[in-house]
Amino acid sequence: MSNSKSLQRFFAVPFGLWSALFIVLPLFFVLWHGFTDGNGAFTLENLTTVLQWEYLKALGLSVELALVSTIICLVLAYPLCLILQGLRKAKGIMIFLLFLLPLWMNSLLTTMAWQTILEKNGILNEILRFCGLPDMALINTPAAIIIGMVYNFLPYMALPLYVSISRIDHSIIEAAWDLGANRWQTFRHVMVPLSMPGIVSGCTMVFIPALTTFVISALLGGNKILLIGNIIEQEFTAAYDWQLGSALSMVLMVFIILNILLEAFTENTDSRKKVKA
């Protein structure tokens, strides 16, 4: 037994080093710069600066667009996973892998492709002109950013949803039908509660990167729309104000921690229900 534990500790060393170098140490420097001034003295001025209207406005817009993108991804991914779950296993997996193709490409390239599609003289407006329809001014708007977020992050919603729905025992659904439940009642009272861990996991995996992104908003929103991720990127790379950039990053960390706690609470609740059952 002691040899087994020693072996486990030995194999855990690389992960421990990786976590210390690329997780713990960066977080320490973010907290350090967030609570200190340029001379290294402790201060809360950085956090009070975050409360200025321009930063709160960018944070509010970031949360709004991230929530809208997450809801759209959920609405699109859930029916898709239900359809795939009803297909034969080989065919369903093949279609699902094709759906995950965007994950195999660089997100910067796909976002630039959407920039080409949505711009004033882009592919979308060329098609509309060919059909005799008026142009659509989508580029440099919140709608363009949402489109980019949904396209890039939709697979992150579909993956945990597909796994969660695939694990649902079909006999439970048949039992609900035998007891007189219609399709809507079965979906609402059986499918959704049983797939809730996948829903929460998918929403977390979409909301967090959508909240912190700055590449998508920079390319599709231009300089007219600044999200909190763009401001943080500018503070670190252009203004070289690491203190303010770290303070803004700490605000985003609060949202990330809340999402993780919500996911953990949902998983614990689901486990307790299974134990009682």
Image: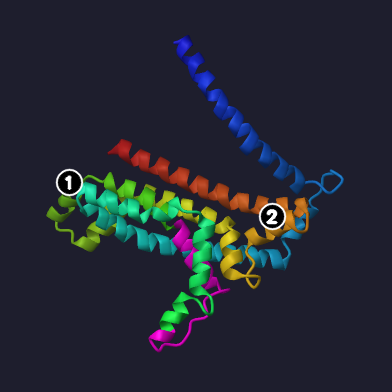
Q: Could you tell me which residue is drawn at 12 percent across and 53 percent down?
A: 178
Badge 1 marks a residue whose secondary structure is: helix
Where is residue 69? Give x, y as percent.
47, 63
Disc nearest the viewer among 1 and 2? 2
Q: Which residue of the protein is positioned furthest toward the left in this rendering?
A: 178
Q: Quadrant of the C terminus?
A: top left
Q: How many marks?
A: 2
Res 23 quadrant in image: top right
Q: In the figure, is residue 128 to the left or right of 29?
A: left
Q: Which residue is mark 2?
A: 248
Q: CA distance from mark 1 to mark 2?
A: 49 Å
Where is residue 124? Give x, y as percent.
45, 77
Q: In the figure, is residue 180 to the left or right of 219?
A: left
Q: Could you tell me which residue is drawn at 48 percent across and 81 percent down?
A: 136
Q: Nearer the viewer, residue 159 or 178?
A: 159
| Residue 67 in view, yes or no | no
Q: Could you tell me which residue is drawn at 87 percent across and 45 percent down?
A: 39
Label whose residue precedes the other's in the sequence (1 or 2): 1
Q: Which residue is mark 1?
A: 171
Residue 243 sits above or below residue 64 on the image = above
Residue 100 sits above or below residue 28 on the image = below
Residue 181 sits above or below residue 126 on the image = above
Span of residues in magenta: 129-153
Colour scheme of the rendered structure: rainbow
Q: In the figure, is residue 183 to the left or right of 21?
A: left
Badge 2 marks a residue whose secondary structure is: helix
Q: Could you tell me which residue is drawn at 41 percent across and 42 percent down?
A: 267
Where is residue 190? Give x, y as percent.
26, 53
Label 1 sits on what residue type?
Answer: Ser
Magenta segment: does it hold 145?
yes
